[in-house]
């Protein structure tokens, strides 16, 4: 009855670093692992090293997070998890939300049983992060993503009942970081899916589960356009969503423009390939 929200995106730019920076950080990490004495290595958050060239101080934590983000950008999710899981008992928010994000992505290619375990572990981690720090944009963002996925396992009633909560956390994430394009995309997708409910589906849902949120395709368009302004061409599915939303609004010329941009998009992962295929199918009907 109620379509799945497409939160299965892959961030492509927010944590993006140049190859040279990644190599520099990885080399720093490797050298420190070799030369640091055991006690210093264990003091993860306290050991500092000064860069002789620019007099900047780089902590072990900064290097750890940079390495994790570089691995994440390369879709090496298992390596990210293996790197960070040993530090989750430190109750550090930056570790916790990254672990939740990684588990969410790992769950997409896992079996149903293993995927469910990963999502429930991710929820425990991101829920703990939220309790520790409720003014962190990434914590709110990934809480919304993981909560929606968790409730997918618990049935349509749980998902419908959490719609307001999901949007509230996405709105908070966007308020704290208005320049994160993927959060804007997710808000647009939330509006699109709610607006796309047929009247009879909404009536049944309201009768059985209580009042369902309302939204419009105009609302969705605002978020998709904002995302594209903040970070042009950041995600194939945002282009696809722009095309589909313009179609819903009866603006065929604009729709074709964005659908063609989607088909021309350089595919880097399965999400991109899926977007290109869907855009081609829609164009074939116009």
Image: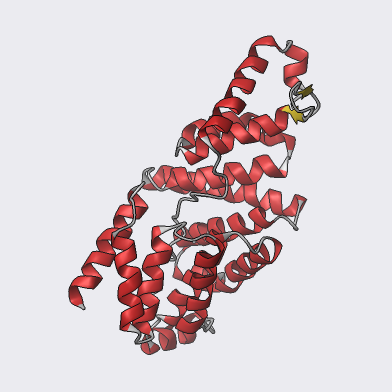
Above or below, comparing residue 39 to residue 218 in the picture: above
What kind of colouring is applied to the model shown? secondary structure
Task: Give residue 6's position: percent from left, percent from top.
Answer: 43, 62
Task: Give residue 141's position: percent from left, percent from top.
Answer: 61, 58
Above or below, comparing residue 271 to residue 99 in the picture: below
- Residue lying at 71% horizontally and 45% vertically, measured from the top left: 93
Q: From this viewpoint, which residue is outermost toward the front?
A: 53
Above or below, comparing residue 244 to residue 74 in the picture: below
Above or below, comparing residue 10 to residue 216 in the picture: above
Report whether residue 216 is seen: no
Describe residue 208's horizontal placement relative to residue 23 as left or right. Answer: left
Q: Quadrant of the N terminus?
A: bottom left
Task: Give residue 31's position: percent from left, percent from top.
Answer: 64, 15
Pick whichever, 275 or 135, lies toward us. 275
Q: Quadrant of the C terminus?
A: bottom left
Task: Give residue 138's position: percent from left, percent from top.
Answer: 64, 53
Report whether residue 101 is seen: yes
- Residue lying at 68% horizontally and 57% vertically, measured from the top left: 137
Q: For residue 37, what is the image quadrant?
A: top right
Q: From this viewpoint, which residue is outermost toward the left?
A: 284
Q: For residue 171, what is the image quadrant?
A: bottom right
Count all numbered tags in the image, as a single digit: 0
Pick whichever, 146 or 285, lies toward us. 285
């Amino acid at each position: 009855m109620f379509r799945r929200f497409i939160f299965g995106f892959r961030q492509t730019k927010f944590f993006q670093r140049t190859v040279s920076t990644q190599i520099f950080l990885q080399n720093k990490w490797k050298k420190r692992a070799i030369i640091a004495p055991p006690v210093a290595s264990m003091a993860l958050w306290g050991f500092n090293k000064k860069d002789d060239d620019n007099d900047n101080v780089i902590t072990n934590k900064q290097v750890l997070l940079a390495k994790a983000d570089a691995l994440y950008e390369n879709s090496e999710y298992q390596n990210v998890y293996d790197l960070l899981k040993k530090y989750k008992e430190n109750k550090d928010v930056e570790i916790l939300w990254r672990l939740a994000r990684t588990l969410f992505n790992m769950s997409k290619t896992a079996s149903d049983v293993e995927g469910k375990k990963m999502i429930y572990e991710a929820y425990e981690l991101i829920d703990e992060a939220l309790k520790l720090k409720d003014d962190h944009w990434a914590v709110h963002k990934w809480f919304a993503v993981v909560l929606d996925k968790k409730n997918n396992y618990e049935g349509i009633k749980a998902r419908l009942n959490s719609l307001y909560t999901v949007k509230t956390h996405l709105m908070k994430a966007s308020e704290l970081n208005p320049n994160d394009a993927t959060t804007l995309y997710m808000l647009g997708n939330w509006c699109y899916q709610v607006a796309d409910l047929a009247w009879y589906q909404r009536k049944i849902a309201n009768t059985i589960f209580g009042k369902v949120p309302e939204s419009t395709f105009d609302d969705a368009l605002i978020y998709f356009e904002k995302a594209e302004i903040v970070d042009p061409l950041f995600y194939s599915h945002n282009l696809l969503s722009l095309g589909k939303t313009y179609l819903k609004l009866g603006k065929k010329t604009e729709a074709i423009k964005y659908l063609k941009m989607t088909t021309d998009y350089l595919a880097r992962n399965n999400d991109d390939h899926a977007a290109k295929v869907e855009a081609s199918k829609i164009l074939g009907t116009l």
